[in-house]
Image (cartoon, helix red, strand yellow):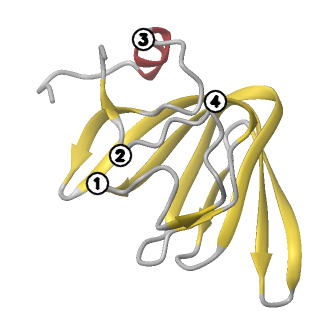
Amino acid sequence: MTDEPISLGTALASFDALWSPRIVTRVNDYDVRVAKVEGEHLWHVHDDTDEFFLVLDGELRISLREPAGERTVRLPRGSVFTVPRGTEHKPYTPAGASILLFEPTGTPTVGDRHDEIPDHVDATTGHALGT
């Protein structure tokens, strides 16, 4: 981590991998991660933590399986949404997006329970910038 300001645009420009978040900073015991995304992630659940999304560019959609049924939220640029812990969800974007995530350090991108991990999804707890 650095004690200098971090440009999110510069951070996003430093990598090309999709669905492979980079840790830009830490706040207490939380990672602030940025990711480039396109296509579908996978259905997964974080049993013990909420998952915060901020759309920096593009549009993200998140399908949710809730007690009342399945629904999809649409997040245009500048929108935020928190998936509650224990909620099965699948982020996707047909046209691509850049997102910021705020999660406890060590949280896996594929959650605690998930479908089979496709090749285009990086099962990680985040990478340092520059890797």
Q: Which residue is mark 2?
A: 125
Mark 2–mark 1 contact, CB under 8 Å?
yes
In percent of width and height, residue 31 lies at 31, 47
Kindly identify which numbered label has been placed on residue 98: none
Query: Can you identify the residue that label 4 sits on?
Result: 120
Please indicate whether residue 83 sits to the left or right of residue 51 in the image.
Answer: right
**Mark in the foreground, 4 or 1:** 4
- Which residue is tagged 3? 10
Q: Nearer the viewer, mark 4 or mark 2?
A: 4
Query: Which of the marked residues, 4 or 1, is nearer the chain's N terminus?
Result: 1
Task: Please tell me in which quadrant of the rendered image residue 30 appears.
Answer: bottom left
Where does the N terminus fall, quadrant-wise?
A: top left
Residue neighbourhood size for the residue with mark 4, other residues' Cα within 10 Å, grouped as few (<14), some (14–19), many (≥20): some
Q: Amino acid at mark 4?
A: His
Residue 101 in the figure: left or right of residue 4: right
Quarter of the image that includes the C terminus: top left
- Above or below, comparing residue 49 to residue 38 in the picture: below
Query: Is disc 1 in contact with disc 3, using a CB cutoff of under 8 Å?
Result: no
